[in-house]
Image (spheres, grey):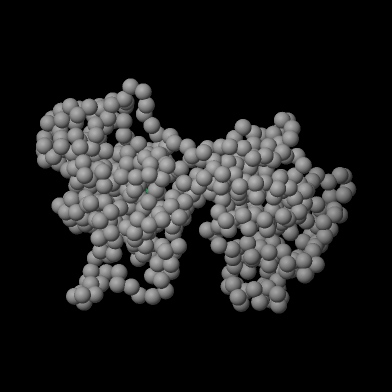
Amino acid sequence: MTHLTLPGPGEASEDKAALAARLAQLPAVDRLLARPALAELAARLGPALVKRAAQDELAAQRERLRADAAGATVPAPAALDAAIAARVDALAAPRLRRTINCTGTVIHTNLGRALLADEAIDAVTAAMRGYSALEFDLDGGGRGDRDDVVEQLLLDLTGAEAVTLVNNNAAAVVLGLAALSARKDVVISRGELIEIGGAFRLPDIMKTAGCRLHEVGTTNRTHPRDFDTALTELGARAGLVMKAHWSNYAITGFTAAVDDATLAQIAHQHGVPYLVDLGAGALIDLSRLGLPREPMPQEALAAGADVVTFSGDKLLGGPQCGILVGTRAAIARIKKHPLKRALRCSKLTLAALEATLRIYASAHRLPERLPVLALLTRSEADIRAACERVLPLFARYAGAGFTARIAPCASQIGSGSLPVERLASAAVVLAPATARGAGRAVEALARRLRALPVPVLGRISDNALWLDARTLLAADEATLAQQLALPSAPQATATASTATAA
Ligand SMILES: *Cc1c(COP(=O)(O)O)cnc(C)c1O
């Protein structure tokens, strides 16, 4: 209880008594809540939230009084009300905070991946406002299948015979494996036992799906005969041949992998299906847009894959979901599996995906209409121009201890898409003026930018903060102008951020 600094002889009891008197001056929570300003807040935002804010503020005040037993005084009622109101504001603010992405990574999993097209946003809004024929057959008047909302579009775009959807691609892989290979062996190249973002590790996914992992080949080289031999040995225990796209790494040098057509052929000779987990799965040939090529589901299907899985919110640029396309027989087995019901998508996802796929189907102005493609194809000149517009704001905000310049850099695509490729970009670079303590100064600046009302996120490299403007949106520039124009002297900022953090 007593956090008092050790009192000198004879002072102890006086200080203790003075502190106790000051602590007693702090009003009780119930009396605070009865005050008009706070009662009004409670009526609007709920008594529980205001009570929590009041308790937090009282605890902070007690702490302050104890820390400075001699000097600190109890704040005036109006100041206490204001401090509590500020806490109420912070508690009532959305937890899913908007952020300004200056990492340059377009498909950033931790920042929500793909930004949606306007058409998709409108479709989601409409689906939320009113009833929709989600699982209703308007012709027959009976029950429908929610996959039908996007089925025809996906069949046309990928050339598949059938499709089904779940909440994300990890779920699509689990479901595909469980439905096609439960209690059997999944044969896969040793070079493809991938881990994506920690939680998705293929060997664990297989266990979860009730399959046995049967790895063949070596880390760098796998040949057709490796699969053939394994399938012959396994006989009836073989359930599936699988390929997982190297999403977030590359194996280069002395390598060999088996192509889709050969793998599909070998699998089918042994009477088992062939499943490809593409991860990102671009629906169009990205090299047509000047981007590195990424495998497309339609190619794997044409090569003979029975099922291809890919994400809706990576290169496709739609909502988070997992898409399974494939043969009628394989998809029918998948749709019958009980996990399909447990993993099904919401109407919001379907509405957004349908609108996104319609843009692909139109084949009209894709890069302009799909934000993911717009950001990936953003020209270096355009990014540099954005840097020039915001450079003075950041320079002023960072203060005299920093130098600010514009430098070329390389953006990652993100989310396991095109892992090795980088896109030429430009960044505002904020570097401490002196080398001494530079690391800590950069960390502190990054923290200040994260503590802004709309947090700004960059990346630290070479003792400097790099703000890659590839992912800086037009609306973000206006926000930056507002929030970075605030007093920016280090002391002033420190006070401001303590105030918001308090
Ligand atoms: C990203 C990825 C996944 C996981 O997809 P989510 O949409 O994040 O669930 C699975 N496999 C591969 C190859 C991936 O790249």
Query: Would you say 328 lies left or right of 99 here?
Result: left
Q: Look at the image and tell me in which quarter the C terminus lies.
A: bottom right
> Is 316 placed above or below 194 here?
below
| Picture mark count | 0
Q: Nearer the viewer, residue 101 or 45?
A: 101
20 or 451, nearer to the observer: 451
In this rendering, would 378 be left or right of 489?
left
Residue reaching furthest right?
10
Q: Examine the rendering and report whether any part of residue 442 can be seen.
A: no
**Percent x, y of residue 197:** 42, 42
User: Which residue occupies the extreme top position in the image?
Assistant: 254
Q: Provide residue 72's location: percent of width, then percent of height.
A: 82, 56
Residue shown at 45%/62% (left/top)?
118
Q: Residue at x 75, y 50 (%)?
A: 488
Residue 76 in sight from this viewpoint: yes
Q: Quadrant of residue 303?
A: top left
Q: Is residue 332 left or right of residue 44?
A: left
Residue depicted at 44% across the width and 50% down the height:
373
Q: Is residue 438 above or below residue 81?
A: above
Rendered view: 431 above or below 133: above
Q: Which residue is depicted at the point 23% across and 37% down?
A: 260
Q: Nearer the viewer, residue 56 or 41?
A: 41
User: Which quadrant of the structure image shows residue 288?
Assistant: top left
Can you give x and y, in whole percent of width and height, for residue 316 in the image? Answer: 38, 51
